[in-house]
Amino acid sequence: MPDSGLKMELVFKLKRVNDNNYEKGNNYMEKLRKEIETYLPFNEQEEQDQRQFLRLLEHMPDLLTRENDVAHITVSAWIVNPSRTKVLMAYHNIYQSWAWLGGHADGNPDVREVIRKEIEEESGLTDIRFLTDDIFSLESLTVDGHEKRGTYISSHLHLNLTFLLEADEHLPLRIKPDENSQIGWINVSEIAEKSTEKWFVDRIYFKLCQKVLRDFPPREYYKAYEDRYKTIHQKGASWFSNTPTPIVMELLEKYGISLSSPILEIGCGEGRDAKALLEKGYCLKATDVSPEAISYCKAAFPEHISNFQTLDCLKDHHPFSYTFIYSVAVIHMLVPSKDRTDFYQFIYQHLTENGLSLICTMGDGKIERETDIRNAFRVEEREHSSGSIPVASTSCKMVSFSTFEKELKENHFTIIEKGLTESFPDFPILMYALVKK
């Protein structure tokens, strides 16, 4: 039998654990209250519900659990696909309707943890991402009295916090039989037809669709590398090697591009080629469509932070001209003809009168193939130096030399030289063309 000293030690340890948990819970609740207080309402419904939330938080301290049978906190997930055309919904057994995913806080004040748990339980999805860490929507929802697992639940309020997330619509799903009988991606245009809860459709789902399109418009297919970079960087690794593309430096030296001449890189990625030029002292502006890639470069090369910039050359205004513009393994990611034309035209418009541009694209000059851009962002297993990793799919259009030359001439370029090259180990074979206006 343990002595009294050991018993007392165990009692004190248990008290410290309970005190820590209590303090942690209080901190989370205070943080949650402040989040709700500072939330910017989207419409009158949210404005009125926000006031009600704050009143109840002040006068009902036990809102985290269902023991409060008048009102308690719930969370919901509005999960969209990258193109924003579909929403993940479940056919709920109680309401006999398609509805969003979510559930009760059940004493856990970390509502983001709760929503991840609910999504996994109800759909099997774990590979999801918050489009914003902020509360996306809030609503006070009335729940009619109903039977659940043989017990009558009285009518009450759900003080609901909605979070916006994104997931790949091709990932496997599963149902949770005690809560739902179907789970699937519903076209936004079909929500009103699928859901039998008219009030939800008119007041909540329609509102959420509006907010998504306003604040998080569809992502362009060619931005899928953003997701891939985030996945690999979170593991403390890089996707590409740090070995520069030899032909970039070779042509700079061959055609006498001076260190002071303005140079633009389109698609710098993780800085493989930019690093080599900057270390040589070239006047380089290295750009990429991926904010994650630019953040990575700025962290990796802190002495050159001002040389890196996020740029979507298909859409963004850029006021400068350059003596030399180069792009390694970017044009192959653009599939529709209009996007490829816009890419070439950006280069044409930003070259000085006697400027040169080096364009390298994946391919051996013979094979032509392209992927379906609708599959961009789709998670797939890819081999990496660290092992097999699930990452976002990206787009690809390989063209032959004849097609490549035709595109360049249609965009008013004169080809100075062309051929095959490499950027080993990342791109063992590349076509290249050095062009001028």
Image: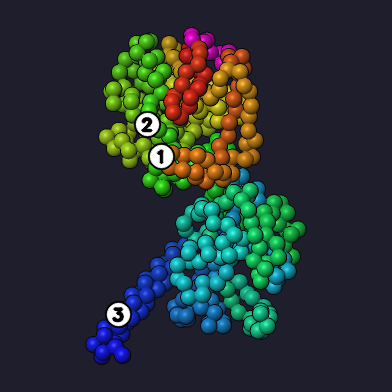
Based on the displayed image, in which of its 4 quarters is residue 87 positioned? bottom right
Residue 339 at least partly seen:
no
Looking at the image, residue 49 lies above or below residue 134: below
Looking at the image, residue 363 lies above or below residue 33: above
Query: Dots 2 and 1: beta carbons under 8 Å?
Result: yes
Residue 271: give its label: none
Task: Say whether residue 39 is magenta.
Answer: no
Disc 3 residue type (three-letter): Lys
Seen from the viewer's position, the closer of residues 379 and 56 is 379
Residue 13: give its label: 3
Q: Residue at x 30, y 80 (%)?
A: 13
**Colour pattern of the rendering:** rainbow
Q: In the rendered view, does 221 fall on the left or right side of 254?
A: right
Q: Residue at x 54, y 57 (%)?
A: 126
Q: In the rendered view, does 320 fall on the left or right side of 339?
A: left
**N-terminal-most mark, 3 or 2:** 3
Seen from the viewer's position, the closer of residues 251 and 41 is 251
Task: Say whether residue 409 is magenta.
Answer: yes
Residue 238: give its label: 1
Dot 2 falls on a residue whose secondary structure is: loop
Looking at the image, residue 40 lies above or below residue 398: below
Dot 1 falls on a residue whose secondary structure is: loop
Q: What range of the chain is rendered magenta?
A: 406-417
Q: In the rendered view, does 273 fall on the left or right side of 436?
A: left
Query: Dots 3 and 1: beta carbons under 8 Å?
Result: no
Instruction: Give the class, few, some or many, for how many residues have Cα within 10 Å of label 3's Cα (few <14, many ≥20).
Output: few
The residue that disc 2 covers is: 242
